[in-house]
Image (tube, coloured by chain):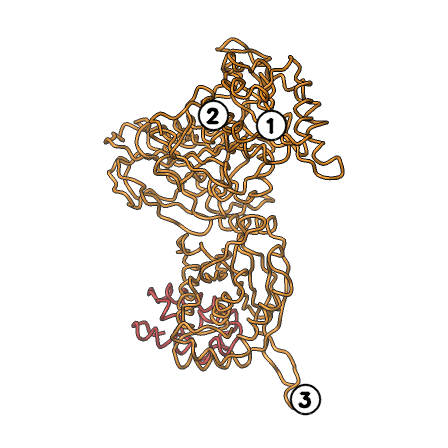
Chain colours: A orange, B red
Amino acid sequence: MSQVAPRVAENLNRALHTLFAREENLYLLGEDLLDPYGGAFKITKGLSSRYPDRVLATPLSEGGILGVGGGLALCGNKVIVEVMFGDFIALGFDQILNFASKSVTMYGTEVPVPLVVRCPVGGNRGYGPTHSQSPQKHFVGIPNLALYELSPFHDAEAVLDLALRAGTPGIFFEDKVLYTQRMFRDGRVDDEFGYRLLGSAPGWAHAFPDGAEETVDAVVIAPGGLAHRALAAARALRAADGRSVHVFTPARLYPVDVEPVLPLLAAAGRIAVVEEGTAGGTWGSEVARVLYERMWSSLRGPVLQLSSADSIIPTAGHLERRVLLGASDIEAGLREAAAWTGQVSRSVATPAVEPTTGVPLTVPKLNNNDTAYLVVEWLVEDGAWVEPDTEIVSLETSKAIEDIPSPAAGYLRRVVAEGVELGVGEVLGHLLAEEVTVDQAPAPAVVSTNGHHEVHAGTYQLDRAQLGTAAVVTRSHREVPTGFTVVRAEVDGVLDTLARLSDETGALLGLAEVVVKAVAAAHQDFPLFFGSLTDDRTVALADAPHVGVTVDADGALYVPVVRRAHEQSLVDVADTLMDFRMKALNKEFAARELAGGNIAVSLNPDPGVVLVHPIVLWPQLCMVSVGAVGEELRPDATGAPAVRRVVHIGLAYDHRVVNGRDAVLFLGRLRDSLEDHAWLDRSLGEPVTAPT
Amino acid sequence: MSSLEKIVAEVLETSRDEIADETGPATTGAWTSLRHVRIIAALGREFDLRITPREARSCRSVGDLRKLLAEKGRLA
């Protein structure tokens, strides 16, 4: 292997030579592609000398070339057609739309049409309005037509081979500026970025900053022609803001297949799609449509779509640069969409030292409920030196106050004041390498807090806690199509046993503890109930039952999590629940105690409550509800009426995953656990489970 | 009527006459787990003391609460 990676044009030329050597029925048609000229961009150099019968120069008629190419492919050959400039493909549009693509399925039986149209596109070469366009969007959504794009990540032979074997016609767009660039290889883009390939080859390329493969602030989805510009923007955002921006490049543009990268996109939540064509009905908008369908709930904002200006493409270089999408446009677009320009900091404080160096201290994502948190208190003096992992600032979510550790060592330069509300990802301050003078700086202005409800004439402002609840229930109703089933359990026996065990242990044991244990015990046989949907057809299963339990204190609803509940004894669960209730009353929960549940139990013991229809806490799939103990007259063994104590146990479930019959079986298991209470004695001081 | 009975009656939203040493979650459905904690929290404020979760869950009646207060030097 040579030390220097081949240029993209060389890689493409070698790919064609390899394919011609391997495929005896492969033809190449196009204008001016015979040696010694070898095509306008020399991509076909050497081919006509070696394969004169199969590399054919044609008249200047794109319609004719594409018609002949489609016919050859229809007759069982493999065909590559070179369109000299992508702009000219408009002249062959009819042959692609109405002949080649339709021929696959319009004859009553499926007919392969292995035709690939190579299509140099894009500007930045000063070729003017009719030799610089990016016409990809005009071909999106045509049945039986696939679209591919040349990329510095993907070996051209693999992409062309895939296109020729697909059985349908395809267009291979080649951004002209790539031809002279070097291929990326061995997992390296440069000294700052690495990459890997995802999905079935050639699949997607995933480029990431060194040391930040698993940390992502935003993703830029870029076709091959935009890869360098997207990477340049990512470098700039890393250098100036410390942001981890990843770049994803697919070998095949259409049909859009995001499966291989969906988890990574979901982790990022903030996504931009960039393309050089003009806006309006584009490949980028098709990508956005798919992402909205597949990961609506994971997105932190709209998919940012960046295109070139709504203009013809000027020939003059300085004007062309103003029209075509560049790296600086991508950088600026991401900054604006993600509010990485520190708008809040500028509006509330003016740092004495411009924090252009050092490590930014940003608002982390603390839960799934809130999009913004309140800066309650700075725990470190402005200008003071802090070590890594030093708790540096307290943020208030709708449920808890969380102390945020320092991500690095440095001198703290605050840029926001206490009382400010900031969104996830916004800048709190910077950790600078050099000491700063803070007494020259105006003190950050204290902005009015909004932690409490305000009542004005005729209106009522919801407080932060209720806003958090509102976000949860709204998301639940938006995301989860629920079913609901209820069973009744007789609990005389279990209540008597609990009273006895309470006397024996000194612990206050109630139905809540029993239900938590019973739910946890069901994990082994009902794993789906503890899962979460990662996309429309994939359920991530949990390794252990982490049972959330509702605690409603002074109007604030919490769902702290009993972790690994199957391993806790009944008394341990009682202690845990008591601890939760006291923390709820004192508002002492840490965010970590409220996260990580994979099923939840809604406890409603207030007298008179018959049953409760709970929501499902997305992304969980199920929530169990338990009503208050009531009394019913039931015939005893002799047929005489007798008072029985009963509770109603409900289950709200995500009907996409769980069906009614399974819900009944699950509830039946819980009912059995309550009615067959012999297991309770065994579970007092050991992690014994409810009956399975 | 001591402060203990007064607090329990207020939290349970019942008459003080209904409160006896035996009163607890086993004798009245109104004594829910959350109200139990409210009683604990109210006692903590009234008598200026800290009651741990383990102490809280070990008290299952007014009598137990009285005993706990006595142990902490706050006779109710």
Q: Secondary structure at mark 1?
A: strand
Find disc 3 in the rendering and name its residue. A639
- Mark 3: secondary structure: loop
- Disc nearer the start of the sequence (1/3): 1
Point out the residue furthest to the right here: A108
Under mark 2, the amino acid is Arg
Q: Are marks 2 and 1 in contact (CB under 8 Å)?
A: no
Residue A298 vertical position relative to residue A328 in the rendered view, above or below: below
- Circle 1 chain: A
**Number of residues whose C-alpha sits closer than 10 Å to that of mark 2, classed few (under 14), some (14–19) or many (20 or more):** many
Residue hosting label 2: A14
Q: Chain of mark 2?
A: A
Picture coordinates of residue A334 (x, y %)?
A: 47, 30
Q: Position of residue B23 (x, y in %)?
A: 47, 78
Q: Earlier in the sequence, mark 3 or mark 2?
A: 2
Amino acid found under the numbered disc labelled 3: Gly
Q: Which residue is mark 1?
A: A116
**What is the number of the mark on residue A23?**
none
Horizontal side of residue A275 vs A596, given as left or right: right
Q: Quadrant of the N terminus of chain A?
A: top left
Q: Is residue A101 left or right of residue A30?
A: right
Residue at the image point whose x is 58% and y is 60% from the top: A614
Q: CA distance from mark 2 to mark 1?
A: 17 Å
Q: Chain of mark 3?
A: A
Mark toward the viewer: 2 or 1: 2
Q: Are marks 3 and 2 on the same chain?
A: yes
